């Protein structure tokens, strides 16, 4: 039966690398959520503006 030694330095480096990757992924996700929210707000404002413009045109006609 072979004995496997644990290299603490390597384990810590691997953990730090994994943490770094997860942290970057979370930052990218947060950026994406923010961009999607901005797009949704912009579309809502544009839809409201178009609806109001339609109402003004209807009143003028």
Image: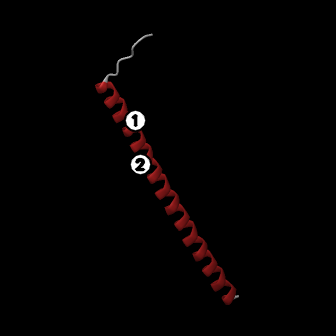
| Identity of the residue drawn at 53% across and 61% down | 39
Left or right? Give the position of 45 relative to 3.
right
**Element marked by disc 1:** helix
Q: Which numbered marker is on residue 18? A: 1
Q: Is residue 46 above or below residue 4?
A: below
| Number of residues whose C-alpha sits closer than 10 Å to that of mark 1, classed few (under 14), some (14–19) or many (20 or more) | few
Q: Is residue 9 left or right of residue 4?
A: left
What residue is shown with label 2?
27
Q: Could you tell whether 39 is left or right of 56 in the image?
A: left
Percent x, y for residue 30? 45, 53
The answer to whether residue 49 is above or below residue 35 is below
Q: Position of residue 33 (x, y in %)?
A: 49, 56
Q: Nearer the viewer, residue 13 or 54?
A: 13
Q: Which residue is at the front of the view, 20 or 38?
A: 20
Tell me which label, 2 or 1, sits earlier in the chain.
Answer: 1
Residue 34, relative to residue 58: is it above or below? above
Q: Quadrant of the C terminus?
A: bottom right
Disc marking residue 54: none
Crowd tier of the residue under label 2, counting other residues whose Cα lies within 10 Å: few below 14, some 14–19, many 20 or above: few
- Closer to the camera, 4 or 34? 4
- Counting every numbered tag in the picture gives 2
Q: Secondary structure at mark 2?
A: helix
**Which quarter shows the N terminus?**
top left
| Image spot of residue 45 (x, y percent) | 55, 72
Q: Residue furthest top?
A: 1
Relative to residue 39, is residue 47 depicted above or below? below
- Using the rendered view, name the quadrant where residue 51 is placed: bottom right
Q: Residue at x 42, y 11 (%)?
A: 2
């Amino acid at each position: 039966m072979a004995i496997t030694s644990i290299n603490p330095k390597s384990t810590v480096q691997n953990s730090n690398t994994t943490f770094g990757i997860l942290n970057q992924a979370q930052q990218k996700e947060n950026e994406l959520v923010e961009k999607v929210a901005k797009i949704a707000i912009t579309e809502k404002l544009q839809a409201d503006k178009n609806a109001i413009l339609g109402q003004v045109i209807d009143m003028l006609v």
